[in-house]
Amino acid sequence: MRRYHFDLVDTDSVTGAGGALLDDDKQARKVALQLVQEVRVTRPELIGHGYKIVVRTENGGEVWCAAIDPLTSGPDSP
């Protein structure tokens, strides 16, 4: 198992959202997506401001990141 850290990041600052011992990067991505959903529900004021959850290993290497902002459709969407 490896320790992963989950940070809530905007363009100016980083807030540590916590850490966890997980089996692999795939599991860390799943946890990050759960955190994204949680932030969207509990902190809706962060939506639309460029926040993201960044997953790092214990040595600081970035594994993955997921935007808090929901994916939007293209400019031709109704």
Image (cartoon, rainbow, N blue to C red):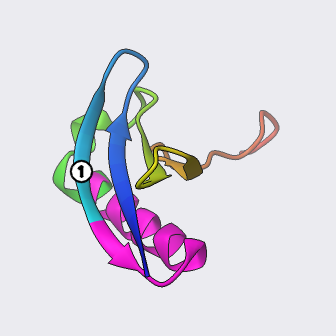
What is the total number of numbered labels drawn onto the structure image? 1
* Above or below for 34 versus 6: below
Under mark 1, the amino acid is Ala
Mark 1, residue position? 17
User: Residue reaching furthest left?
Assistant: 42
Image quarter in which the C terminus is found = top right
Q: Position of residue 52 (x, y in %)?
A: 44, 41
Q: Position of residue 27 (x, y in %)?
A: 50, 79
Q: Dividing the picture into quarters, in which one does residue 3 lie?
A: bottom left
Whether residue 61 is in magenta: the answer is no
In the image, 71: left or right of 50? Answer: right
Q: Residue at x 20, y 46 (%)?
A: 43
User: Residue reaching furthest top?
Assistant: 12
Choose between 28 and 76: the one closer to the eye.
Answer: 28
- Secondary structure predominantly adopted by residues drawn in magenta: helix
Whether residue 23 is in magenta: the answer is yes
Q: Position of residue 57 (x, y in %)?
A: 47, 56
Q: Residue at x 33, y 76 (%)?
A: 21
Q: Residue at x 46, y 49 (%)?
A: 59
Crowdedness near tag 1: few (<14), some (14–19) or many (≥20) residues, C-alpha within 10 Å: some
Q: Secondary structure at mark 1?
A: strand
Q: Residue at x 33, y 41 (%)?
A: 8
* Above or below for 56 versus 75: below
* Above or below for 13 versus 64: above
The segment highlighted magenta reads 20-39
Image quarter in which the N terminus is found = bottom left
Q: Position of residue 72 (x, y in %)?
A: 63, 45
